[in-house]
Image (cartoon, rainbow, N blue to C red):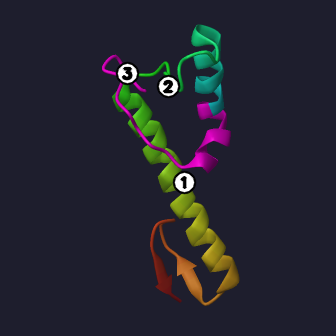
């Protein structure tokens, strides 16, 4: 649950290891412990949390583009988001 309204937001499991999310999980533990009937309350407002998740997703896409570039040297990365032939 995120924010005052307790919005349910589903995220990728691999994002849970990101330092920002680890910090939020640590805060959630400090505030609530792990005895919370299966619900995890993240101490963050919804818009900020969505921004964090969006940034992580964009970062994954950029990393993926760079990895494709490394495997295919004939592709030039122009702005980190789009690939164009060289």
Which comes before the other along the chain, label 3 or label 1?
3
Q: Which mark is nearer the camera, 3 or 1?
A: 3
Task: Name the residue at 43% across, 27% down.
Answer: 1
Q: Residue furthest left?
A: 5
Give the magenta range. Answer: 1-21
Quarter location, residue 23: top right
Residue at the extreme top of the image, as rendered? 31
Residue shown at the point (64%, 11%) measured from the top left: 30
Q: Secondary structure at mark 1?
A: helix
| Quarter residue 51 falls in | top left
Helix, strand or loop under label 2:
loop
Residue 18 is tagged as none
**Label placed on residue 39:** 2
Q: Is residue 10 above or below residue 62?
A: above
Mark 2 vs 3, N-terminal side: 3
Question: Which residue is nearer to you in this view: 33 or 75?
Answer: 33
Q: Main secondary structure of the magenta part?
A: loop
Question: In whole angstroms, how far apart are the C-alphas of marks 2 and 3?
Answer: 13 Å
Instruction: Report the side of 28 relative to 3 (left or right).
Output: right
Q: Which residue is mark 1?
A: 59
User: Compared to 57, does 43 lie above or below?
Assistant: above
- Residue at label 3? 3
């Amino acid at each position: 649950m995120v924010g005052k309204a307790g919005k349910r937001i589903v995220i990728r499991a691999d994002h849970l290891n990101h330092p920002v999310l680890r910090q939020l999980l640590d805060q959630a533990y400090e505030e609530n412990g792990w005895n919370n009937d299966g619900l995890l309350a993240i101490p963050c407002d919804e818009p900020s949390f969505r921004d964090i998740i969006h940034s992580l997703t964009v970062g994954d896409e950029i990393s993926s583009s760079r990895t494709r570039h490394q495997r295919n040297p004939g592709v030039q990365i122009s702005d980190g988001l789009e690939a164009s032939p060289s």
